[in-house]
């Protein structure tokens, strides 16, 4: 019996996009980021094809009220480098949460998606807000 592999067409995928709303209040950062990454990639759909951008839109609210396990608030650091000698910067997670908690959620989700050509398109559909309010009326669930 011959089996056929289903390949989702990119033209079909863009018409089937849905909106998902995730309230991050009290959710653990890593577990929430995994769920968001799956929605952005489209892994929750039966028509998932890994090389086609078939994911949905995701709106994350209350990013300032995420929960961190263990001692991450004191021990975790974000590292960046300017490319020049001595251009290394480390930012503690606690300071980043005070400055912009949206960036903490964004980086957690970004690092859970494969680094390829689709990642930028998938992350463009991620909307993060530190409070309750968001302008996306299309959010169904």
Image (spheres, grey):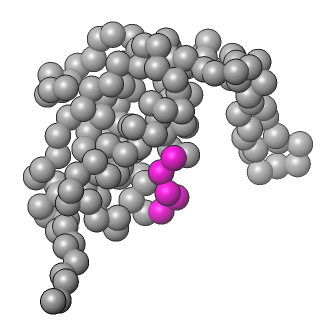
Furthest residue to the right?
A: 86
Is 140 situated above or below 107? above
**Image spot of residue 2 (x, y percent):** 17, 89
* Dominant SS type (magenta): loop
Say which quadrant the N terminus sits in.
bottom left
Residue 54 located left or right of residue 66 = left
Q: Examine the image and state in which quarter residue 123 appears.
A: top left
Is 35 situated above or below 136? below
Say which quadrant the C terminus sits in.
top left
Residue bounds of the magenta highlight: 112-116
Q: Residue at x 27, y 26 (%)?
A: 21
Looking at the image, can residue 63 be seen? no
Furthest residue to the front?
A: 1
Looking at this view, is 116 or 20 the one in front? 20
Q: Residue at x 45, y 30 (%)?
A: 32
**Image spot of residue 44 (x, y percent):** 28, 48
Is 80 situated above or below 69? below
Residue 90 located left or right of residue 117 = right
Q: Residue at x 55, y 46 (%)?
A: 111
Q: Residue at x 71, y 33 (%)?
A: 78
Looking at this view, is 60 or 1 the one in front? 1
Figure label count: 0
Looking at the image, can residue 93 be seen? yes
**Image spot of residue 73 (x, y percent):** 70, 18
**Per the image, is 87 magenta?**
no
**Image spot of residue 105 (x, y percent):** 50, 29
């Amino acid at each position: 019996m011959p089996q056929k592999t289903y390949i989702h067409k990119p033209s079909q995928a863009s018409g089937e996009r849905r909106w998902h709303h995730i309230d991050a209040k009290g959710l653990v950062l890593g577990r929430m980021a995994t769920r968001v990454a799956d929605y952005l990639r489209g892994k929750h759909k039966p028509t998932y094809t890994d090389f086609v951008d078939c994911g949905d839109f995701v709106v994350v609210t209350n990013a300032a009220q995420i929960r961190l396990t263990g001692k991450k608030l004191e021990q975790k650091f974000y590292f960046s480098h300017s490319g020049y000698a001595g251009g290394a910067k480390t930012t503690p997670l606690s300071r980043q949460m005070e400055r912009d908690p949206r960036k903490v959620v964004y980086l957690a989700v970004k690092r859970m998606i494969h680094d390829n050509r689709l990642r930028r398109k998938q992350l463009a559909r991620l909307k993060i807000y530190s409070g309750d309010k968001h302008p996306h009326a299309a959010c169904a669930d």
